[in-house]
Amino acid sequence: MKAGIVVFPGTNRERDMAIALRVVSGRAPKMLWHRETSLPDLDLIVLPGGFSYGDYLRCGAMAAHSPIMREIRKFVSEGGYVLGVCNGFQILTETKILPGALLKNTELRFLSQDCFLRVDNAETPFTAGWQKNDVFRAPLAHGDGNYVADEKTLEQLEGEGRIAFRYVSSAGIACSEDRKSNPNGSVNAIAGIVSADGRVCGMMPHPEDLVDPLMGGEDGRPLFEGLMEVFIR
């Protein structure tokens, strides 16, 4: 799997993502500086977490206008695969590559904790390593992870099976109003979505931080293993 990781000023999770990709694929990803105006031959581009441009204006708003994002739009239009995690998800919504927006957490404070996610659609390239309704643990660390969208968009996402991950209790139960299971208050407890063609995924929690027993578990590893299967076929 030939992967590239975009680095913006303020990105701080690119090394974690690089470790995860290398552990699973055996191949070191390329680091792509945000001023790049041409992309190498890649299967997957990752927008990692952090605070691009210091989160000035809005999280991801300035990064959305970086030169490399024009190339990523083209990459997406030509059938490329993109994963955006945390700040990367925020950038994908700011560029309208994915619908909706990420607002301040309901309790207006930064959260750094583990959460549980349920796989609501195991038919996407990003969830193929799990079975539908599987529940796994993932770390989260964000201040603006409260996913929102208008009613029409929500109906479309739900109706088309584009909710990839949902915040749940350890027993797999989703409740939007329960701050223990849905800590940031996201509408419909949405933690991650995919594009209409399934090739772009945005999610707030960090699966890359649980891919090895030395990290405390391998709960996030199926995401990367599932992607590997897509590119091997």
Image (tube, rainbow, N blue to C red):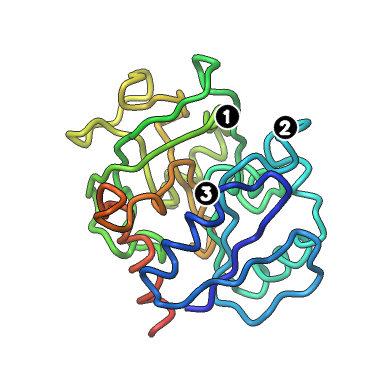
Instruction: Mark 1 and mark 3 in contact? Answer it, CB < 8 Å.
Output: no
| Left or right relative to 189: residue 34 | right
Please report whichever mark, 2 or 1, sits nearer to the chain's N-terminal start: 2
Which residue type does callout 2 highlight?
A: Arg
Q: Residue furthest bottom?
A: 233
Which numbered disc, 1 or 3, marks the residue that appears first in the sequence?
A: 3
Name the residue tied to disc 3. 85
**For the view shown, which residue lies furthest in the left direction?**
171
Measure how far apart labels 1 and 3 are at the Cα level: 13 Å
Mark 3 to mark 2 CA distance (whole Å)? 16 Å
Residue shown at 35% from the left, 76% from the top: 229
Residue designated by label 1: 144
Whether the residues at callouts 2 and 1 have beta carbons within 8 Å, the answer is: yes
Residue that carries the numbered disc 2 in the rendered image? 58
Which type of secondary structure does the marked residue at label 2 adopt? loop
Q: Amino acid at mark 3?
A: Val
Callout 3: helix, strand or loop?
A: strand
Foreground pick, 215 / 171: 215
N-term mark: 3 or 2:
2
For residue 117, above or below residue 208: above
Instruction: Mark 2: give few (<14), some (14-19) or many (20+) Cα within 10 Å.
Output: some
Image location (x, y in percent) of residue 185: 45, 23
